[in-house]
């Protein structure tokens, strides 16, 4: 049994704990002769890196990736690609308090109940530190997909504050620390998050990821549906509590006429007049942009005491000191993009395996 691996032909296994010496991943199935070096991976990790603004955890990690295998003279060889990031800013003492006290909303109680042992330092394996390796694998996946596929994510809601879709500007996303695509929403979010942070509290968010240039035909009927694999991949990210494709839950309040994406042939090419489906029909990509959203819960580690229990069954109140993101949705943006890249790379290779290119 392996629960640390996902994907079929582009297969990613991650390993490591938050406060261990290092974290890493192994990517098996990457095609050979793809140019790859650290500079293809590092910029994506830098976007996820903690300690970059007052709105994310002040843990300082360089997140410097090393390629240990699978690359020779700047090209992938078709053998397993092993990537490693050394942990450099582990402060286990911040977590001594929660060695025996379960943080409400975190994985502590579930891990202990299941395994009877857990590395409590920074949450161990349940820490989102693991998501750095997803971002690294996502960078390799982007190389497999090629420059024709563009995957971009943005935060579209923070707490009660959503964006105005008419203002959506993708160029703004990488120019601000909140991955906000709406110039008017940005100052509102900054003030709101500064207040949340000051109170030692936290808040949830919604992230949208759009993949353009996805070729039609990726995904397979029934148990190989592209949308079900996307949902699994996004739902596997720490703190994600909801996933939508296309209209998502809003489709429930649409009529058939409103939800249908009309089709016409134009200049010998199939054209859709809208994209309520989010780029997938019958589990197979249509060639339209793939649109996925996911909801991230508020960070469970907060300074307000919350009733909880200890390992020994004692009633206590738990407040979590240490360094935490007031809104983990911010750093989940690059992670969501990476998971979509990995799923698309996997399905591209699976499609080639069955149907050819
Ligand atoms: C990028 C990112 C950073 C996170 N940072 C923290 C954090 O600083 N403190 C915390 O309590 N949870 C954090 N989380 C969420 C926990 O990892 C997550 O809630 C925990 O593993 C329990 O899993 P679940 O929420 O999916 O049930 C983060 C999540 C993400 C995606």
Image (tube, grey):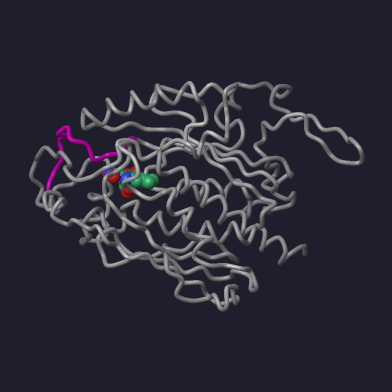
Q: Position of residue 74 (x, y in %)?
A: 57, 73
Residue at 34% x, 57% y is 62
Residue in front for this viewpoint, 299 or 283: 299
Indicate yes or no whether the magenta region holds residue 20: no
Would you say 232 lies left or right of 220 here?
Answer: left
Q: Position of residue 224 (x, y in %)?
A: 63, 55
Residue at 51% x, 52% y is 338
The quadrant of the rendering that contains the N terminus is bottom left
Residue in front for this viewpoint, 320 or 316: 320
Q: Position of residue 178 (x, y in %)?
A: 42, 35
**Most common secondary structure along the magenta stretch:** loop
The quadrant of the rendering that contains the C terminus is bottom right
Residue in front for this viewpoint, 228 or 161: 161
| Residue 1 visible within the image | no
Q: Which stretch is magenta?
A: 298-310
On screen, 165 above or below 131? above
| Residue 30 visible within the image | yes
């Amino acid at each position: 049994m392996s629960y640390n691996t996902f994907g079929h032909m582009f297969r990613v296994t991650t390993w490591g704990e938050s406060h261990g010496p290092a974290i890493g991943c192994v990517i098996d199935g990457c095609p050979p002769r793809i140019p790859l070096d650290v500079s293809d991976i590092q910029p994506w990790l830098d976007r996820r890196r903690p300690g970059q603004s007052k709105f994310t955890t002040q843990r300082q990690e360089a997140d410097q990736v090393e390629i240990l295998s699978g690359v020779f003279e700047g090209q992938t060889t078709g053998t397993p690609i092993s990537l490693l990031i050394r942990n450099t800013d582990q402060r286990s003492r911040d977590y001594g308090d929660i060695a025996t006290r379960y943080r409400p909303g975190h994985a502590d109680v579930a891990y202990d109940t299941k395994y009877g042992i857990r590395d409590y330092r920074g949450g161990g394996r349940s820490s989102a530190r693991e998501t750095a390796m997803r971002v690294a694998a996502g960078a390799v996946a982007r190389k497999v997909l090629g420059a024709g596929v563009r995957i971009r994510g943005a935060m579209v809601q923070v707490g009660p504050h959503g964006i105005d879709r008419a203002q959506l500007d993708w160029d703004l996303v990488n120019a601000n620390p909140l991955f906000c695509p709406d110039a008017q929403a940005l100052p509102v979010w900054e003030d709101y998050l500064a207040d949340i942070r000051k109170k030692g509290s936290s808040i949830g968010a919604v992230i949208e990821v759009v993949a353009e240039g996805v070729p039609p035909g990726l995904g397979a009927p029934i148990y190989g549906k592209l949308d079900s694999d996307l949902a699994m991949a996004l739902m596997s990210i720490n703190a994600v509590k909801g996933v939508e494709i296309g209209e998502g839950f809003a489709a429930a309040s649409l009529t058939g006429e409103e939800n249908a994406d009309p089709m016409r042939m134009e200049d010998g090419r199939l054209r859709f007049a809208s994209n309520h489906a989010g780029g997938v029909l019958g589990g197979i990509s249509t060639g339209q942009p793939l649109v996925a959203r996911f909801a991230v819960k508020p960070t469970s580690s907060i300074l307000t005491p919350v009733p909880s229990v200890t390992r020994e069954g004692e009633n206590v109140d738990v407040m979590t000191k240490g360094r935490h993101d007031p809104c983990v949705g911010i750093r989940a943006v690059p992670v969501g993009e990476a998971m979509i890249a990995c799923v698309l790379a996997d399905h591209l290779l699976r499609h080639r395996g069955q149907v050819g290119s």
